[in-house]
Amino acid sequence: MEKFELHILGCGSALPTTRHFATSQVVNLREKLFMVDCGEGAQMQLRRSRLKFSRLGQVFISHLHGDHCFGLIGLISTFGLLGRTADLHIHSPRGLEELMAPQLAFFCKGLPFEVRFHAFDTTAPALIYDDRSVSVTTIPLRHRVPCCGFLFEEKKQADHIVREMIDFYRIPVCEIGRIKNGGGFTTPEGEQIPHARLTRPADEPRRYAYCSDTAYLPRLTEQVRGVDLLFHEATFLNADEARAKETFHTTAAGAARIARDAGVKQLMIGHFSARYDDEREALAEARAIFPATILAEENRGISIHKYSDNEIL
Amino acid sequence: MEKFELHILGCGSALPTTRHFATSQVVNLREKLFMVDCGEGAQMQLRRSRLKFSRLGQVFISHLHGDHCFGLIGLISTFGLLGRTADLHIHSPRGLEELMAPQLAFFCKGLPFEVRFHAFDTTAPALIYDDRSVSVTTIPLRHRVPCCGFLFEEKKQADHIVREMIDFYRIPVCEIGRIKNGGGFTTPEGEQIPHARLTRPADEPRRYAYCSDTAYLPRLTEQVRGVDLLFHEATFLNADEARAKETFHTTAAGAARIARDAGVKQLMIGHFSARYDDEREALAEARAIFPATILAEENRGISIHKYSDNEIL
């Protein structure tokens, strides 16, 4: 199975604590890295993760609050010192480029690569990234400022050809691509061998949805229905539900209701408020509603599987 | 003895590593906190130090390179969330206020306290902070951009009055302040008791000098002569001396020569390049020239003493 992993760099909320960095995570899809949010310290955590800096080409910023983007300038500056030459693409709601331009001009003069900003609309889902193996679509959220989550959808791959069939029918190399993509094979004797006999089906594409920061938003279930892993913010406990409403955040139980109603395979909760000393209570409140819940945790990775449980790395 | 401590929050150089944060430290003088430089992650490290955020009133930025100031916006933002009301003073070379103003306006709207920027000249020593207990003077350094170190000089305190003398001569409370500050006492019988008989001398004022980033600069010895603790950058080893010159940094041996020639009591080296895996070699190279050298280390504190060795906390 191709690699599809999520690495948590930080899962705290606005106030950093001794236990949590501000929000940042990395999706590793077949060794291409996608950063989601970039709070202060993201570059240090990325270094700790041992993921390769040079593999990171796209950064997705959910919204322009400091705990989701203050790490960008340090990350870019470090990429410059490391001699990066590949463009770095930053996707965010409108306004980030204007905010960062003076800093980039002053602190990152002579950067050996281009920083390309892409602003997205936050009112309707939009495809903002697409390549051979993955697409990224925005998930409009409801927060105090324009905000979107992101849906990572793996592309369906070509079927696997069965080596024994190549040998048995002496299939020439030039035919293999066509067969993997759905074709059959005709032997020199004119026998038609159907595609299904020559191949094993490709792995089912996997999906990961990231939703932070947001008020409890039942309509989310439509867009994240059945995903293999849902990250949902769970800033508050039930006891602080009023505070969650006021600040446009969600409780652990609220996140679990979304997961349950959307029929997702697994829920990871994060974006923990600094007011709580540990997250086991949040976990208990979520599991009471949706048992397949796990806690986000710094320097923790999870490998996303389709037919077996997602695996903690 | 009154508290005079140095806490290292970060002692790496431009590239953060898994072992070092970017440069930041805190001077604790009688529970007033002074931050010196504020690299990315400084607020997280400050939290780890268990020092009280509310005690921090002054921040001194040596120069406008990212690894010395990218932590400011997060620190200020967090102070806002914590409901700080006291002004925060930031001293730096010219240009910082203009760079930060757009970010502050966007990310820190409605901050419940004032951020007051004070630009200093970097070409000649200048007194930039002064209160009852300490003064801070700039130490012009030589780097690729305008840069100053900082000299913290404790003020001489009043002498200690000897309790037994108060009792013996029945000295009224209203006289004590005058006597501590140099006066004698005349008994109701007209006997003159000299100041020296009534008091023990105040502790000798202590001095701490911070020098980072700078090329090897022999004239520094004049301004840091005899300080109780000198922090000096030691970005490179002897083997990379050419690189030190090119980048306007100092080797560990260069830092030790400054310490030796200035007759300081103790040298702490820091601002270590990411290229070295551990700093024991830097320590050995420095100690060969100036034995009273120690390594800066994250989350390490040192208490500055006058008549005995500075004490690692």
Image: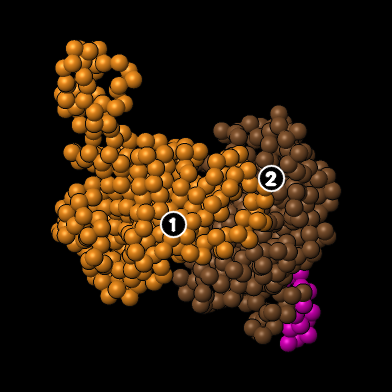
Chain colours: A brown, B orange
| Number of other residues with Cα within 10 Å of mark 2, as a class: few under 14, some 14 to 19, many 20 or more | many
Please state which amino acid type lies under the numbered disc 1: Ile
Question: What residue is drawn where x is 77% and y is 77%?
Answer: A183
Please state which amino acid type lies under the numbered disc 2: Glu
Q: Judge from the rendering whether residue A239 lies leftward or rightward of residue B48; answer left or right.
A: right
Q: Judge from the rendering whether residue B65 lies leftward or rightward of residue B136; answer left or right.
A: right
| Quadrant into which the N terminus of chain A falls | bottom right
Residue occupied by mark 2: A233
A205 up-or-down from B293: above or below: below
| Magenta run includes residue A196 | yes
Q: Which quadrant of the structure image shows residue B166?
A: top left
For the residue pair A252 and B201, the one nearer the viewer reads as: B201
> Residue A42 got which mark?
none
Q: Which quadrant of the structure image shows residue A304?
A: bottom right
Q: Is residue A220 visible?
A: yes
Residue occupied by mark 1: B61
Place of residue A112 in the rendered image (x, y in percent of width and height, measured from the top left): 51, 77
Place of residue A168 in the rendered image (x, y in percent of width and height, measured from the top left): 65, 76
A192 up-or-down from B309: above or below: below
Which residues are drawn in magenta?
A183-198
Residue ranking furthest to the bottom: A188
